[in-house]
Amino acid sequence: MPEALQNPIVLWFVLSVALAGLAYAFLRRELLVKGTLYGSFLLACLVAAWPPYETPDQPGKIRLGLDLRGGIHLVLQVVTDDALNATIDDAVQTTRDQAGRKGIAFASCQRIDATSFSLEGVEPARVKDGRDLLRDYFRAEWEIREPSEGRFLVKMTDPFVRIVKDRTVKEAIKTLERRVNQLGVAEPVIAEHGSAGDQILVQLPGVTDVEQAKRVIKTTAQLALKLVEDQAPSREALLQSFQGKLPDNMEVVQGAGDTPGQPVFYLVRREAVITGRDLKNARAGVDQNNQPDVQFTLNPQGAEKFKRETGRNIGRRLAIILDGSVASAPTIQSQISHDGVITGRFTVQEADELSKVLRAGALPATLRYLQELTVGASLGKDSIRSGVLASSAAMAFITIFMLVYYRLSGLNAVVALAANLLILLGAMAYSGATLTLPGIAGIILTIGVGVDTNVLVFERIREELRHGKTVRAAITNGFERVWITILDTHATALIAAAFLFQFGTGPIKGFAVTLVWGLVANIFASYFVSQFLFEWVLGKRHVDSLSI
Amino acid sequence: MEILKNPNFDFLGKTRYFVAASLAIILGGFLLMSRSGGVRYGVEFSGGTQLVVKFQQAPAVDLIRTAVEAQSQGAVIQTYDDPKKNQVLIRLGETGEGELTQTADRVLASLRTAYAQNPVVESSSEIVGPIVGAELRRKAVQLTVLGLLFQLVYIAIRFKGAIWGAAATVAVFHDVLVTFAFLAFFKYEITLNVIAALLTLVGYSVNDTIVIFDRARENLRQKRKDPLTKILNDSLNQTLTRTIISNGTTFLSVLGLYLFGGEVLRSFGFTMVVGILVGTYSTIYIASPIVIWWGGYRKKTPGGTGAAAKAAL
């Protein structure tokens, strides 16, 4: 059985169509067939959309947008240069290591920009070896140039740059998904966004603690444990013993000191003992002084490395670096293999959030906010209330007007209008479209267009009656003559809706979606259902006058 | 019940005054916009920070101002929506250096501490970076122009005679410009919602023109001897009831939206309210005169006769 048929609503509808077809084949009663078809379709819409609202017992069938439910909408830019820089840094490190291993002397090897590095002043006798080494390690994805003897420029090719960028964004999305799962948000959206290819859209409906969510999303959570060589109150003081020039295998990292406002600088080994990738798990806990801390467990590879390095460096200090700053720098007391503790001046909440982001993994690059939209839950409720008020007011007014002005035919229009709204809601619920605040405006406009259709038809019928046509002929002519005009009305509005749809996500798309469904529903309801109602009421009786 | 029995108004007798009035409004709108430094964009287009903060009790705007000013200069602070809801809208002057949401976060934090006895219940924010704002602005212009263009293509296909299409087109542009003038006069910002309303009302306006022109062409076929002005005037009268009721009901629905739809939808409601009025007006006083003038012009050109002019329509 096709998948769509397994949906009870679809199945039921298909069965009704089949039954109606049979009825027509045997009974030849067109009206009965039409009535059954229309009725079962409307019933299907009712079932699909009921209950539209959230009730205490069950969730509503219509999905509400962020602007109505409250929540967060973020557009983040992945600073892909971070990942490129890291790639080049890795390449520089590899080149240095390999040249050292092969005993090739060189003057310098350093990064030029985000996508290239240079190897300069290779000793004349070994230039060929240097060339071979680079060719060996940097193959198809790289471009090696040799502007002068002993000087090499190595650059990432454009396709490789694209691959790295793409991978970074995908990795960032995966990490964000894991983090959002930790927050326990229902129906989150995390997806690539925009045309530039480096933007991520994050939508978290119903989130109340906006700040916590933002912190959990935003923290890069790059953890690295590095051996401390020295510590001083300033950068300059650290570099004094090296004549002011930082050695290649070291770096300076800042950390908060014991007294606030007086940072401490650490000289650490560039190479990390372990990084966030070596973690298996992390959880918030408390230390012996009842201070919140984060305890972590390493995976087998990490544990092996950690065991080796801690065993070799007992008595030395290990800096725990989180997002480029030293959280703490405890002394290695004994050999450690699996477990470790990150202490720092954490609050309970900070420790909890840190353990969450460590569990979810580090982001491969920094994220930058491009857009933030948050809607408080009560503001969303206010919006729903005003939306419902405005639509009810429109609906009530139109009902009264149509009944007074067109009398019984007005009732026909009101029934058609109700059918219109029912189909609109059913389609929204069934297709999983999101109802936004402008979407409610779209519903109100649909009511307007629906009435417009009825008025066009009714006015034409009146005119035909004035020209002395019989009731039956007037109705037939009335519907036929305005068909083209009704198509025009809907076509022009559909063109507008199609362009609004292009605005992509967000409230305006919701407007376009309701408008499109509303227009489609309206052609069915205000034209075909209304026509059916006339035919049905008139039946086979002889009528002299029409209540219009 | 009927509003009008066989209406016979002379709509097209004094069109030049109405055309002049339309031009004056459009010109006034342009002057107003250029004097106040161009179009006023909403946060989503201009980039920037807008916060809506809900307090437990009625907030004192002065106190809020001091707290906000300490963090960010040149903020606009005003009551938002119904005063009973204790909500304040804060639009920050500059986004500031560094992280996009930094200033907003600081402002919110300082409001919490400075206003401890009247706590912040809830807040909403709209913070848009310059990149996203510019992108959206570009997209909005692109889509609006393309949307208009497609409507025009539809009109051209719909009316095979070029002049009917041209007249409907001019009317549509007229509607957009006049609505812009009204938005400028009533100091509305151009937001995404306004753009959505503008595109929708273009559809409405085209549709309104189509209904009346359809009738005019039908009459033109049946009563070839009548002068063009009379044919158009008759068509306007014949469709008048429909125009009043249809546009009236739609007008009242969007008026409901404007009055009860809440703060967020107010600009949308306003644009639609103005747009529907202007769209109805422009069919009568912009689109129809153009067709008549064109017909008159064809009559005066050498070799042209009244019948030939009408046949060309």
Image (tube, rainbow, N blue to C red):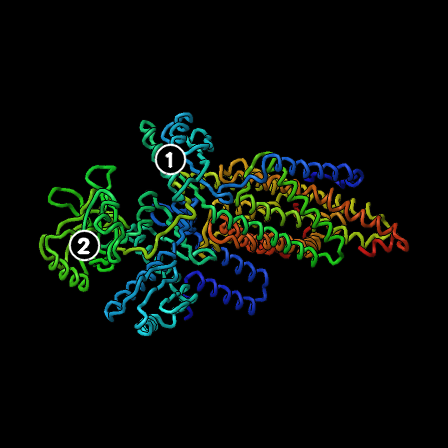
Q: Give the residue at the far front of this rendering.
A: A124
In depth, the one of B226 and A312 nearer the eye is A312
Q: Which quadrant: the N terminus of chain A? A: bottom left
In this rendering, the answer to whether A11 lies above or below A206 is: below
Q: Residue B127: image x %, image y %?
A: 43, 43
- For mark 1, does the 10 Å Cα neighbourhood hold few (<14), some (14 to 19), or many (20 or more) residues? many
Secondary structure beneath dot 2 equals: strand
Q: Give the residue at the far right of this rendering.
A: B303
Give, as a three-letter code, the residue at label 1.
Val
Residue A250 visible? The answer is yes
Chain letter behind tag 1? B
In this rendering, the answer to whether A153 lies above or below A403 is: below
- For mark 2, does the 10 Å Cα neighbourhood hold few (<14), some (14 to 19), or many (20 or more) residues? many
Location of residue A212 by image quarter: top left
Q: Residue at x 30, y 56 (%)?
A: A178
Q: Are marks 2 and 1 on the same chain?
A: no
Kindly identify which residue carries mark 2: A227
Kindly identify which residue carries mark 1: B107
Q: Which quadrant: the C terminus of chain A? A: top right
Residue A530 visible? The answer is no
CA gap, disc 2 and disc 1: 40 Å
In depth, the one of B35 and A466 nearer the eye is B35
Give, as a three-letter code, the residue at label 2.
Leu
Q: Nearer the viewer, mark 2 or mark 1?
A: 2
Q: Residue at x 23, y 37 (%)?
A: A260
Q: Residue A180: image x %, image y %?
A: 32, 52
Q: Residue A230: image x %, image y %?
A: 18, 49
